[in-house]
């Protein structure tokens, strides 16, 4: 390992590996990063094994992807925190619990739980890892220095993260293709050649709606439609058309990619800074814009809102649902 370069690890817990693939999606910029860093551990790309991990003494930066669902992943997160100067929660699963966090709707409470004995026997038979009582985001297991949200994070945000946390002021032509796609506060810090303050989420503070170019008129929620039931080209607010778009509660920074192509925001950047509970905010937003005050009509509309936890907390149930037991 070159002592002049920063040592980097990219580690995955429970997830789809989409975040790791997204790192490769910064394309030709990957090669330029080799001037500043040594990737010393990345099983997805390098086939690194347990022996290489145990041999590591200290890391400069670790990008951790995936949710913590097993005892082995919890131990890995704790060891990473002890060995790493800068620990980054990369992607929605690491940052908020992600889709695996919906397992907490039916947590593995303990050995006396119905079906626990059968699960334990199956796990022992097939060599399955021991599951944690509850799925956790990285921050619920170890202190996190930075968050790069998204499912997966956009190439611009990932590139900004590498530039800010790895290259610093040494990199020439910083953010050559990403600066205009970043929230202003993140771009300002990175372009200056300094890392943002620890604890920063490399995204915006406001909601996606604040940067959405769709026309907002008088909101009247008249129907509940699934995305496959309506493809629109009008440029109007999707929520006004009956598509449950979470842009009103979700942190900006993605550039409004989904609403831009007529698909409702699904909340993969987590809640906006001013939002306490994204689900409660969505219930309030939809309830205040129902296009009828008749009980029967309201009940019909409410019946169309199925799987509220999976809709309003698709990526954030483990950490951002105020009613969920996070212990």
Image (tube, grey):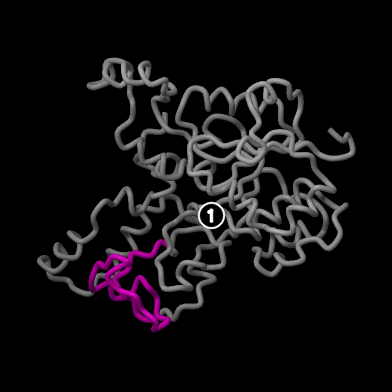
Which residue does the numbered mark 1 point to in the structure image? Answer: 273
State the extent of the magenta-drawn residues as a range: 217-246
Residue in view at x 38 percent, y 65 percent: 245
Q: Is residue 62 above or below residue 196?
A: above
Residue 35 percent coordinates (x, y): 85, 48
Is 136 on the left or on the right of 308, as rendered?
right
Residue 219 percent coordinates (x, y): 33, 76
Residue 138 percent coordinates (x, y): 55, 35
Q: Magenta includes 88?
A: no
Q: Magenta includes 238?
A: yes
Residue in view at x 79 percent, y 39 percent: 38
Between 46 and 284, the one lying in front of the other is: 46
Residue in view at x 61 percent, y 57 percent: 203
* The residue positioned farthest toward the left in the image shown: 296
Number of numbered discs overlaid on the protein picture: 1
What secondary structure do most residues of the magenta stretch adopt? loop
Between 126 and 76, the one lying in front of the other is: 126
Displayed quadrant of residue 118: top left
Quarter holding the N terminus is: top right
Label 1 SS = loop
Residue in view at x 73 percent, y 59 percent: 28
Is 225 on the left or on the right of 70, as rendered?
left
Displayed quadrant of residue 322: top left
Between 195 and 170, the one lying in front of the other is: 170
Q: Is residue 70 above or below residue 61?
A: above
- Circle 1 crowding by C-alpha within 10 Å: few under 14, some 14–19, many from 20: some
Q: Is residue 262 above or below residue 119?
A: below
Residue 61 percent coordinates (x, y): 72, 38
């Amino acid at each position: 390992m070159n002592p002049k370069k920063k040592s980097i690890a990219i580690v995955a817990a429970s997830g789809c590996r989409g975040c790791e693939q997204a790192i490769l999606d910064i394309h030709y910029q990957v090669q330029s990063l080799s001037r500043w860093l040594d990737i010393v551990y990345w099983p997805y790309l390098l086939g690194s094994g347990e022996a290489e991990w145990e041999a590591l003494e200290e890391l400069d930066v670790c990008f951790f992807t995936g949710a913590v669902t097993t005892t082995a992943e919890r131990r890995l997160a704790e060891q990473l925190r002890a060995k790493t100067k800068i620990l980054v929660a990369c992607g929605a699963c690491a940052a908020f619990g992600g889709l695996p966090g919906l397992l907490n709707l039916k947590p593995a409470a303990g050995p006396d739980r119905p079906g626990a004995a059968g699960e334990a026997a199956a796990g022992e038979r097939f060599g399955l890892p021991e599951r944690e009582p509850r799925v956790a985001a990285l921050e619920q297991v170890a202190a996190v220095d930075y968050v790069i949200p998204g499912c997966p994070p956009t190439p611009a945000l990932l590139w900004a993260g590498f530039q800010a946390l790895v290259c610093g002021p040494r990199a020439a032509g910083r953010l050559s293709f990403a600066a205009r796609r970043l929230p202003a506060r993140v771009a300002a810090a990175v372009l200056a050649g300094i890392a943002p303050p620890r604890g920063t989420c490399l995204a915006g503070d406001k909601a996606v709606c604040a940067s959405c170019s769709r026309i907002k008129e008088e909101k009247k929620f008249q129907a509940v439609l699934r995305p496959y039931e309506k493809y629109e080209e009008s440029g109007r607010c999707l929520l006004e058309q009956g598509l449950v778009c979470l842009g009103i509660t979700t942190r900006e920074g993605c550039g409004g990619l989904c609403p831009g192509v007529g698909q409702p925001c699904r909340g993969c950047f987590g809640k906006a800074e001013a939002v306490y509970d994204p689900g409660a905010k969505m219930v309030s937003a939809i309830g205040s814009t129902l296009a009828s005050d008749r009980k029967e009509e309201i009940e019909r509309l409410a019946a169309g809102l199925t799987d509220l936890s999976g809709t309003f907390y698709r990526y954030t149930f483990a950490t951002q649902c105020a009613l969920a037991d996070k212990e």
